[in-house]
Image (tube, rainbow, N blue to C red):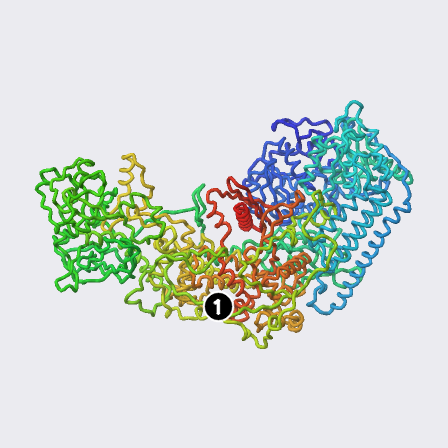
Amino acid sequence: MDEQNPVLGKDAASDANLENRPYQDEMVDRALRENIICALGTGMGKNQVAVSVIKRLQYEIEPAWSEGGKRTVLVVPSVPLVEQQTKYIQKWMPCKVKGYHGSGSVVSAKEGVKDDAVTAAWTKEDWDAELEETRILVMVHDILKDILHHDLIDVARINLLIFDECHHAVGDHSYREIRRCIQTRAEWDRPRLLGLTASVINCKIGNGAEEMECLIKDLENCLGAKVCTSIDESMKKHEALPTVSLDVFKDTQPDEEERKAVEGLDETITWMNAAKNYIVHLEEGAKKDYLNLSHVAPTDDRFRLTITKSLTTVTSALSNMKRSLRVLGPWCAYQTACMVKKDMELMLKHGCFHKEMTTPILGAISQVHMFGTLLEIHYKVHKINAGDVEGVLRLSSPKIRKLMDVLRQNKPESGDTSPLAGLRCIIFVAARFDAWALHKFFEFVTAKSNGEFRFLKSGHLVGQLTPDGSEFPIPYRVNLSYKQSCATLEKFRRGEINLLLSTNVVEEGLDVPHCNLIIRFDKPPHYCSHLQSRARARAENSKYIVLAPEEDSAKVRKDLDAFAGMDEIIRRTCVERNLPAMADQEMHFQDKPSDSYSPPGCKASVTLSSALSFLQRYTNTLMDDRSSSNVIRGQFLDTQPGQYVYRIYMSLSSAIKRPVTSSRPMPTQKLAKQAAALECIRLLHQLGELNDNLLPNAQEQLRDMKKILGLDFQREAGEEGGSIPGTKKRPQYYTKQSAALLSNCRPVSNEPLFLYTITTTFIRSFQDEPAARFIADQSRAIGLLSRTCIPALPPFDVFIYKAEYRVALTLVNSDTFLTEQQLDDVQTFHTNVYEQVIRFSEAIALSFKPDVADGAIYTVPLTRSSEQSSWDIDWDVMARVKEPSQYSVVSQPDEARKRMKITPDRYRDGVVTRWYKTDDDRFFVLNVREDFTPSTPSPIDEFSSFAEYFERKYGIEIQQLHQPMLTTKYCSREMNLLRCPIYKEDAASKTSKLTIQRDKSLMLVPELCQLFPFPASLYSKCLVLPSVMYRLNTFCQVLDLRRQIQRETGIGSTVQDPINWPPLIYSPKLTPATGTDSNNEAVDCETELRFPNSQTAESEPIHVPGPSTALEDSPIPLNGELPDNFEPGLVYASYQREKFYCIEGSNKRKQLTESAGESKRLISGRRKPDASEGKVSKVTECGCAPHLSDPPFLLDAEFNVDATTAPLPDVCQLLNALVTAKASDGFNLERLEVIGESFLKLTSYIHMFFRFPQHQEGRLTQLFDQQVSNYNLYRLAKLKGLQRYVVNQAFEPVETFVPPGFVFDEEESNAVLANSGTKAEKFPSPRIHQAIEDKTIADVVEAMIGTFLINSSARSAQLFMSWIGLHVLPELPGPEEERTTAERYGRFDVTSIPTPMLRNDSDTELVLKRLTAGFDDFENRIGYKFHNRAYLLQAFTHRSYDPNDITDCYQRLEYLGDAVIDFLITRYVYEDEKSFNSGMMSDMRSALVNNRTFSTLAVKYNYHNHIKFRNLRLYNHIEEFVQEVQEKDQDVLTLEADMMCTNFDDEKDTEEEGFEEADAPKVLGDVFESVAGAIFVDSGLSLDVVWRVYYNIMRPQIEYVVKHCPKNPIRELMELEGPNCRFGPGEPLGNGRWSVQVTILGRDTYIGKGNNIRAAKTNASKAALEGLRKTQR
């Protein structure tokens, strides 16, 4: 880019007016009249011309896009130009300008110079929204090309299309394809065109004006515009006119030392070229051999092409070393050799080459080493000191010496010795190696601060290479990253460096400051290069110098003279030209076949030129992994000479499973490739993979999603700025409701009523408690009176007086009649119980209103009848406690106390309160001590008697000194008796002083106490009422839900409910479980309802020795060590500049093994196994081998039961799934949630697998994620009203309980509290509302699935999921309304299994037999022989293996096997007798179900030797991992064995400490899962068969993990450090890696890295825990 007014680094008002020069106004006027190519030299202000034209046409872009407005588009050839042009235009234009750049389907949007906003695969709707506000779009050419091809923007809506650097519009450049698209539109629909260029010639031409005219005419026909320039005299003073000169040097001939140095390099290059030719010959022979077999791919050797490319890489590096010696001299050649040697060693170390290349690469490294050694011997290059200019020039070529002479001659004037004074120079070189070597050279000669060349400060810029479309493209395949290039340019602009060594990347496009010296180290290759590099010399009195050897000087001088003549020719030629004729324009684009494809009735079109990019965009949407990529692969087929046919092999994860061949022969190989790609696009559109805009079809996915979520699915809108619906961060308030079964229970007079008694049965005592005798008193009881029958409910436990009692509700009679008066007495008693005994009178806004209250069950006192066999209502007690005045505590004067009659019988079974105290505490009278009186000596030394104590402390004189004393016990005000207390030995040390005092007996004086109306035996039983009524309401709600589910699903419809429900039993284990964790500490198991557990069968695991494949010893250090000053060079950087996670050697990897008592069993083939150990039994019949041990449980029968006869989970089991941890009850849903989540995953995966047989793993996973998302589960639960039954609030009667018959006035409560000045209760009030997070409701759904699975059957759980709205079963035809869920839904069976075969022709069996050869050994190892081997082939076929065209790749089976293994492991952990809590279950499942574990087991059982793939990096990764597993030689993978402590940082090129998961190849874990999926479908969907096979494979690992109970590192760290632990945000590292930092306040900071944020956070926690352990030692 060049401007008249540079923008960068200068301030200017945004509303400044442009001041055009005369020639610029001339160009603007011409551009407004017709399409022109503005040919102005660099620095002449072409961009100002473009902005002026945009301003003159601004009225067309002012209207909104939706109102018919048009838009201006500027296309540029490079990413830097997007940012520069956006800034420049935004400076002068008041409207919105945005820039877009990217590659493939990724588009980056920039507003001004703000941060990128990345979007992917924008649709027409996305662009319409973008264009609504944006008026001017600056974009890279590829983006506009895609927009036009996909018809995302109507061409007629573009008012002005500007091509920057338009001379690129030749050949297959995107500029030309853009014009080809426009040319197909009607003339009146085409936009106005403006081209900008400094040179209309972009290639090497002869000296004739005729040839130049042809080139200009071709450019005009391509752009549909005429070339224009100005002859205005004012141009001359603005042109860049440096002094052009030729400096000649005398080159030398190679001497004997030079010939000896390169002799070994020549031999190696010759040998490698011969090897490449041999491989090509083998390839051609292979194609001929397989010519008549349609199922054979190009070759069975998956690595030949990669070896060829490796040889090319090495020979290129060696050739550049030779060139450096000849052109630059021994010193620079030595630096290049050192760089090449380091790069090759690093590439070899990190698997850039296939193993078969090890020997050639080592030979090449040896030759490079020998080359450097010879340079040291002959030239002593290693003995030159930094800054020794004479010494280094002596070892440099004549060309470099001439270069230094030129720089001497242009040294700043004497007296100015600052490093950057007066000189700004660019040296253009032809080769990237030369730029790098010369940069090192100048760093060396300027090392001394007082040296001759101290005025120089150099930097180098060698461009940014793009992927070459190779078979194995590698991310960041660049020599110098874009970021580093920009940094170097910025330093050059700021003057921090004044000597820039560059390739032709700086010739055009980049914003470079005016230079006063341009040196062409190599002659310009053509006129355009000469013109553009010369134009960089724009400073006053600048120079343009070309270096040339003496023997070529005449030719170079002739070329320079010719270039000078061309300037004048172009100036004359570009004046007064005419627009190209329409016929000439049409003829211009008929240079290639016009094959294309457009969807019927659509403007979108794909041509031959765009077909490959269209196809690559589609493949980019396919599921990818770091070890492979979605690259289009193919081969040329043999045809007639001059005719080419290409066959494309799509990834097996695509919709096209068969090879696609071009429709007809093409004259060139490139056209043949494009024709095959065009055919693929046509097929993909017909298959529905591409929409009518020929973009990857999102509508099909939307249709599938509607099948899963429902046609009427609408996502709930969250509050603006609030939490997202369906998440844990969004709580909602729900009104608590009374159970429907208790809605009409308020007693009425003169109607039969149901009388129940609350019975309490002693279970156990935790400590001795004298007051327990009152609740054990069987002479009195509390009864409940109800108008309706209360259903039979389970007994449950309460905890009171340091003991556990079982509470049950027993029917006394159902024909109790009350008169109006009796009913009034009952209501009074009921009110007194809750207001006076339980003290709800202290609560605000609670009032007794039985007429409007829900669930008004009345409380009555009961006493034994005369027969002592039944209960009667105790009307005497009811009358005795009726008077309200009895409950008021008043002080007694002396006279009244004198007259008081104090008898022992009056106080026995009594409750008293102290009127002289204000605390309103109440005490049970345990005993009347007639042997103790107030005159009895006091136990307190300072008081002689109790009477003296009261007189001196309270000022009260005891009136009756001989009255008996009362032994009392504090009556606790605790009302939640459902919470089990934990009594430990050190409890006293943590108990408050007040609690200790209340726990002791207290001696009281009767005359100083007021007797409470309720007897202690009745009072103690009243305290149980809040807990009883709370549990009663909850049970009835759950029973109502149970009946609804039974009625609508049909589950257990033929099973009668039990007469007596089993009790709700929960009690925490007061002693630890027998399991221990890895530190031999006791496992704290979670409290849960007691369900039966399956016992684990004992059987010995099968040990199968693995193969032994060790790499040969190599002289290259492969231990992860790099020199401190290591700098990766051009060879390594051009091949692979990505993060390499270094593999540590034994000296740096810390092997953490099991405890000393754990025996280590070897499985590797590195030692000779015992005779019995290494045997593998042969499997002769299909199915499981008889020698396999039986697993601890079987599951198939649970899927085949008749759900109508299966027992429905009882009330307690359902309640277990509805109570959350927040409820603080004796149980919660968390364990059930874990198993339910796993079963939901299994059944959903199975359903998706069968319902969408054409979808691959990526699409299936997306649908699964939508179905099981927290939001969807929350949504479905609310549709069924499940939130009404969830218990998410702790039972705190004082705050959350409304007694039966009472109502709570929320408005009154808020008003009273507000007026009193006290802190008001939260609104809504917890008495009548409970807050439930959306995710909690989703968790309840999963827990409900778990309880149906565990307590009924798998079939019942599937029906429950179908009832709630999840798609897990096939629906049977028939009316929906008249059938239960069990009648509506069937089962997946053998007939549902889709065939694995993609075709079934005559040679299918032959191909299957050939591709499965050698699988017998694998079947013997795992103990299963397949009925249909096509499943086995599919399970081992990676998507890169195109020779297999008879089955799909393993992704679908992996998807299925993942869910199967996950469920089997989760079920095993759940069934373990230790009843692990949910956190431990999740941790153990994570330790067993992960890629590292699966990959290790896959190596042990030889999975890796049967995987079919074609990927070099994947092969190297697997081979490396196999060697690591065999070196460790462990029977089980220890919990810490996946840790390593080093990472490679590609920015600093140094090793950085930090924890990282050892990078096990994902393909090994995937195949381990896919084989499980294959066994599942091959066995007829039998989980038992899969479990039997995989239990034997995984048993040692399972038993190890269950024994050692791993702990999640994040949870462990949070428990250890709590608030001191601070996690930072995830930071992307590139290549799919993430980094997370955790800081322990006051200690240290630790870094973790991984494949995702969660893995990185886990690894950071591991690093922190390890660091904390070290500090504690």
**Picture residue at 47% right of the left edge, 54% below the top:** 1269
Please give the residue where the numbered disc 1 appears in the rendered image.
1388
Judging depth in this view, the residue of 809 and 1273 nearest the camera is: 809
Above-or-below relation of 55 to 1110: above
**Picture residue at 24% right of the left edge, 55% below the top:** 772
Above-or-below relation of 964 to 250: below
Q: Residue furthest top?
A: 415
Residue 1538: where, in percent of width, then height? 58, 55
**Picture residue at 15% right of the left edge, 51% below the top:** 908
1011 left or right, relative to 1202: left
Residue 940: where, in percent of width, then height? 23, 41
Residue 1533: where, in percent of width, then height? 56, 60
488 left or right, relative to 812: right
Judging depth in this view, the residue of 1239 and 873 nearest the camera is: 873
Q: Can the viewer see residue 54 in this picture?
A: yes
Q: Quadrant of residue 1062?
A: bottom left
Q: Residue furthest bottom?
A: 1180
Residue 352: where, in percent of width, then height? 70, 54
Judging depth in this view, the residue of 1456 and 917 nearest the camera is: 917
Q: Quadrant of residue 22?
A: top right
Q: Can the viewer see residue 192 in this picture?
A: no
Which amino acid type is marked by label 1? Phe
